[in-house]
Amino acid sequence: MTTTISTAPLGGPTLPQERRLVTSIPGPRSQELLARKAAAVAAGVGHTAPVHAVAAGGGVVVDADGNSLIDLGSGIAVTTVGNAHPKVVEAVQAQVAQFTHTCFMVSPYESYVAVAEALNRVTPGDHAKKSALFNSGAEAVENAVKIARKFTGKPAVVAFDHGYHGRTNLTMALTAKSMPYKSGFGPFAAEVYRAPLSYPFRDGLTGAEAAKKAISVIEKQVGAENLAAVIIEPIQGEGGFIVPADGFLPALVEWCRANGVVFIADEIQTGFARTGRMFASELFGIVPDLITTAKGIAGGLPLAAVTGRAEIMDASHAGGLGGTYGGNPVACAAALASIEVFETEGLAGRALEIETLLKARLSELQAGDARIGDIRGHGGMIAAEFVDPETNEPDAALTAAIAKACIAEGVIVLTCGTYGNVIRFLPPLSITDELLAEGLDVVAAALAAS
Ligand SMILES: *Cc1c(COP(=O)(O)O)cnc(C)c1O
């Protein structure tokens, strides 16, 4: 078996920041690797771009054929600090040479504690907080629910329409969309209920009206006396970058407080400067009881966390939380380096600059093309929703065609949305203005041609 790693350029910000196509996409080397993938990897594990990466950094991903693609997806909002960020690379290399694992539950180490301290400090609210670390977003969500149930002594959990919380059994139950996340994978975990979301573009409700509707469903179909937790993404990720109307989230938080229900903000996609704030909860003026984080936390290394009110986090008996790898020291080193980058390199401010560029260009496109029904989002988390201009019906076929055309032209874009009709822009915050503008030129051309 050969790999291309030895011949690949080093990643990080010193990679040439350019879109460069030297073959058609996919090129011959990627095609070869895709054939091996098809033969060796389970068919259920899909891919968006038909290339194989060998290096990435700044705002580009370089493939096995030497093509350099503009990255508008950050590996799904993960490489927010930039791929192979030098500070992350340095911290990882130092840690990996020291020790790779002891299991924090066997012999603890400082970096885990330091990550917990940092999370307790940077998450919203100045109350006493504690954290626990895990491997993936889904695992963090599972543990947030465990903690809320243990604290309240109640079983039920409410999630929302269009919500996405992961692919494990409990998190599939919490996730709204059947295809591709749930279909055929049941039966799902019990005591999960679904409430309507605020979706201003489609429901026309104010935040207060949408909250009233949701709370009525919760009270009538579940009852606060049975409800451990409400879990919601402050801005929905996979569900379509849906920004709830003002007042919706504060009303839910207030209802939870008044009714002994734990409010969990799933900030796995929105967290860590992505929305122009360290956490999206800040945009809405809410302070969650528990917050789940992952994706952007560690510059690409697998790490996740639950952070929240100390009295809730401490509800579990000793030994009740953990896992073999949770808070792996290499991932913790990467997280500490990333959090330092977020704070010292002004990445939240950079996300706001990216928002301005994205929204200006998309609005210009929308003015000339009624198929862009809505543009929304915050910071480096912006989406365009594509519709039939006559009926406002979702246009998933158009959306897929645009995304496919962009990738063929060397721009990685991701789609999302319950109806598959949303293109989401999640560039690494290390992307240059020039590359972002060029990426949007390609999107504009793809739209015009579709
Ligand atoms: C990605 C995501 C998850 C799941 O995270 P994994 O690391 O893929 O398990 C959960 N919630 C939200 C909001 C996400 O975006």
Image (cartoon, rainbow, N blue to C red):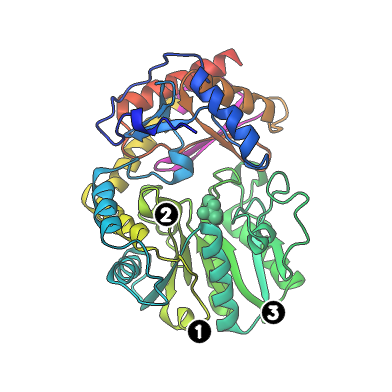
- Spatial CA span between label 3 and label 1: 18 Å
Q: Position of residue 294 (x, y in %)?
A: 45, 56
Q: Is residue 321 visible?
A: yes
Residue bearing the label numbered 3 = 226
Residue lying furthest front: 1
Neighbourhood count class around disc 1 (C-alpha, 10 Å): few under 14, some 14–19, many 20 upward: some
Between disc 2 and disc 1, whose residue precedes? Answer: 2
Q: Tell me which amino acid carries mark 1.
A: Ala
Q: Tell me which amino acid carries mark 3.
A: Asn
Between disc 3 and disc 1, whose residue precedes? Answer: 3
Residue bearing the label numbered 1 = 315
Residue lying furthest left: 344
**In magenta stretch: residue 18:** no
The front one of 413 and 384 is: 413
Residue bearing the label numbered 2 = 271
- In contact (CB < 8 Å): disc 2 and disc 1: no
Between disc 3 and disc 2, whose residue precedes? Answer: 3
In the image, which residues are magenta? 362-387
Q: Position of residue 85 (x, y in %)?
A: 29, 43
Question: In front: mark 2 or mark 1?
Answer: 1
In which quadrant of the rendered view does residue 189 lie?
Answer: bottom right
Residue that appears at 24% across and 31% down: 14
Q: Secondary structure at mark 3?
A: helix
Residue that appears at 69% across and 49% down: 177
Q: Tell me which amino acid carries mark 2.
A: Gly
- In contact (CB < 8 Å): disc 3 and disc 2: no
Q: Quadrant of the C terminus?
A: top right
In which quadrant of the rendered view does residue 221 lie?
Answer: bottom right
Q: Report whether 265 appears left or right of 95.
A: right
Question: In front: mark 3 or mark 1?
Answer: 1
